[in-house]
Image: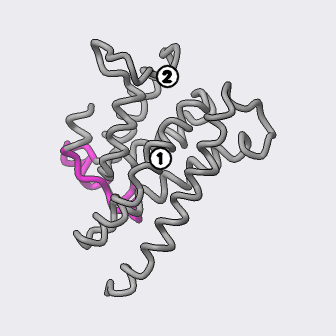
Amino acid sequence: VSRDLDQCGVPSITSSRSDTAKDERFGTSSPHDLLELAALVFYRACATMNKLPLAEKRARKENAATCLREGLMRGNPSWHATLCYLCCNYGTRLAKDLFIYWFDGICSSFGRILSDANMEHSYDGLLWTLRSLRKLFFLLLPIVSGEKVSPKSPSTLNKIPWGWLTVWSCLVHGLPMFSNVS
């Protein structure tokens, strides 16, 4: 799945499943199908996972949560689109610590993702990143507002406001770059 996501062309942020119906009539699968399948694979792998990976230990097989985080950090649009499907379809069934882990990964590379979009004049990837951040916002809001049981450690809980501060700062500093876009 990882290889397919790296090579996949993601649908435009505005395209819908009905836009790809004619492709399906000719026997080819749409990018939406791959994204839904990838979300299901990551859901099943992460649902059976006992705990988040430790940084100091190197596992024999790469952990699914780590694999998704690294794909998100690279800024590949198909990985962010997969996260959107994962949030929509399985967001209530996975541990919130996983979403915090992925959110932290996106935030740590958001500035680079933003500048890459501007340099390449390709904004679908940035739009998918912003869309995945929006989905994460609604999943993580109850944790920050105290409506649900918070994650195990306070340091994990502190990652959420710092992450949003990073995203906001990058967006505010990045807005002048987009004023030249036509």
Residue at 57 percent across and 47 percent down: it is 136
Q: Quadrant of the C terminus?
A: bottom left
Locate residue 92 relative to residue 8 in the image: left or right. Answer: right
- Disc 2 marks a residue whose amino acid type is Leu
Graded by Cα atoms within 10 Å as few (under 14), some (14 to 19) or many (20 or more), the crowding at tag 1 reads many
C-alpha separation, residue under disc 2 versus residue under disc 1 = 20 Å
Residue position marked by numbered label 1 in the rendering: 84
Residue at 51 percent across and 35 percent down: it is 101
Count of numbered marks = 2
Secondary structure under the numbered disc 2 in the rendered image: loop
Residue at 47 percent across and 51 percent down: it is 107
Earlier along the polypeptide chain: callout 2 or callout 1? 2
| Residue 73 percent across, percent down from the top left | 36, 45
| Residue 80 percent across, percent down from the top left | 39, 48
Secondary structure under the numbered disc 1 in the rendered image: helix
| Residue 58 percent across, percent down from the top left | 32, 17
The answer to which of 19 and 53 lies nearer the viewer is 53
Residue position marked by numbered label 2 in the rendering: 52
Q: Which residues are magenta?
A: 7-30
Graded by Cα atoms within 10 Å as few (under 14), some (14 to 19) or many (20 or more), the crowding at tag 2 reads some
- Disc 1 marks a residue whose amino acid type is Cys
The answer to which of 163 and 130 lies nearer the viewer is 163
Locate residue 141 relative to residue 101 in the image: left or right. Answer: right
| In magenta stretch: residue 23 | yes
